[in-house]
Amino acid sequence: MTASAAPLKKTPLNAVHREMGAKMVDFGGWDMPVEYSGLVQEHKGVRERVGLFDVSHMGEIVISGPQALELTQYVTTNDASKLKHGQAQYSSLLYGHGGFVDDILVHRVDDHVFFLCVNASNQDKDFEHILSTAREKKFDAMVEDAGPRYAQLAIQGPKASDVLRKLTDADLGAVKRYHFTHGKVSGAEAMIARTGYTGEDGWEIYVEPKEAERLWREIMEAGREQGIIAAGLGARNTLRMESAMPLYGHEISASITPWEAGLDWIVKLDKGDFLGRDALVQQKEKGITRKLIGFEVQGRGIARDGYEVFIDGVAAGWVTSGGPAPTVGKNLGMCYLPVQEAVPGRAIEVMVRGRAVEAVTVPIPFYKRAR
Amino acid sequence: MYPDNYRYTKEHEWVHVEAGAGTVGITDHAQHELGDIVFVELPKLGAKVEQGKQFAVVESVKAASDIFAPVSGEVIAINDALTNAPETLNGDPHGAGWIAKIKLSSPEEVDRLLSISDYQTYLGAE
């Protein structure tokens, strides 16, 4: 984060969060709710019932025009040509050296329109990255920073569809996981995507900012019967960590490649040329030296991101995310280790305030919902 | 809510001084800000602590927070019960959730701490 006196950005729901008594924090320059009634309660509410999140801070970028597909293919790692209209995929933007610019969701709206959902703190960087690439490579496509045009609400949890169904005429049953549709949600034009960052079934709803507050209140009201709970960024983080979904700046960054992060499945080397491809091919030939793995703390202590990891008394890696996992009921985390050590069952030590705390590597994800 | 015979710090610790020793803990405001407390790292018995310096750590699900000693001295008792029941810090921060007892080495330090009315004014302004 750059030190600046810029005022925090606010989502259209800022006043609602304050009215609800949420604890607010500076998250990537945004004034966001970290918790309302309590992180653990919110986490469990999402796993067991349904939770509502304001994720309007997330960025949106629209790529359109005759060569929208070609540009999207060139700046992302997954194969966007495989997407049908109304389908979405997890993907990433890479630098030429193979490190992450960001991880993103690519939605194919039309033959020549791709809608990208990107991380809040990376919005400007991602936009510049795609725009400058388009100009440099002379793609006949438009790149729009569409963030200001959208508020985003996430309804997540096993009861999410039951709540949303009350408010929309869209045929939710026809929308499969990682697909989306357009329709009205309590009267507001919306893009309704069956995606999320919690490891549960659920929906991410994109609407005009002016609709956000009314929508929030109507969803909370409609969900009363299902026991809906307002959930903040604290629960969002523990939910995604249990599901081992990467968070930019933690599991992935400019100095980490998809191979190292275990995200091979979002890289399609056979789709044609793309930014970072040469570096990835090279690294694949040489072999990676470090890899992401999960761990479970066995000693007394909580492993937080940034803590050092030791093996047999020698510094071996670092924790990317860690903390108590409310549903799993253990102290968990993820860390980078030398590739030969990044296998389940390895005894490691996490340095917690100068004290070595015993842990053991385990496979990720830690949590998978029953389907 | 806040006992009037305790003294407070701007970092939201309290101390209750009796017969040359101070029982210390975190305030209700602090526990509320931290949220669900899941781990407490207590100081060691016999440790020398210094006013304003970190002497314990309290962790919520979200984050680890340093706790600063409101007074200087030697740790003569620790609240071991918190090890297995850290949530006591949320439930009864000014009573059963005490962290340690410190034998004061500089009793005059207590005068520099906030009275209940000063602390409440401070909370209101924060």
Image (cartoon, coloured by chain):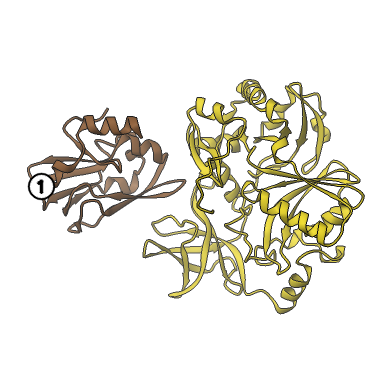
Chain colours: A yellow, B brown
Give how far across and how far down residue A32 sits, in percent: 54, 38
Q: Residue furthest left?
A: B19
Q: Give the x, y percent position of residue A86.
A: 85, 41
Is A340 above or below relative to A80? Answer: below
Q: Residue furthest bottom?
A: A286
> Is disc 1 placed on a helix, strand or loop?
helix
Q: Is residue A289 visible?
A: yes
Q: Which residue is mark 1?
A: B107
When the figure is inspected, residue A258 is found, relative to residue A236, above or below; the finding is below
Left or right placement of residue B42 versus residue A246 in this view: left
Vertical position of residue A139 compared to residue B126: above or below: below
Q: Chain of mark 1?
A: B
Dividing the image into 4 quarters, which one contains the C terminus of chain A?
A: top right
Q: Amino acid at mark 1?
A: Pro
Query: Residue A57: x, y in percent?
Result: 63, 40
Q: Is residue A204 visible?
A: no
Q: For this view, does A56 lie left or right of residue B7?
A: right
Task: Name the residue at the front extreme.
Answer: A5
Crowding near pointer 1: few (<14 within 10 Å), some, many (20+)? some
- The residue under the point 71% across, 74% down is A283
- Give the number of callouts: 1
**Residue B107's x, y, as percent?**
10, 47
Q: Residue at x 77, y 42 (%)?
A: A177
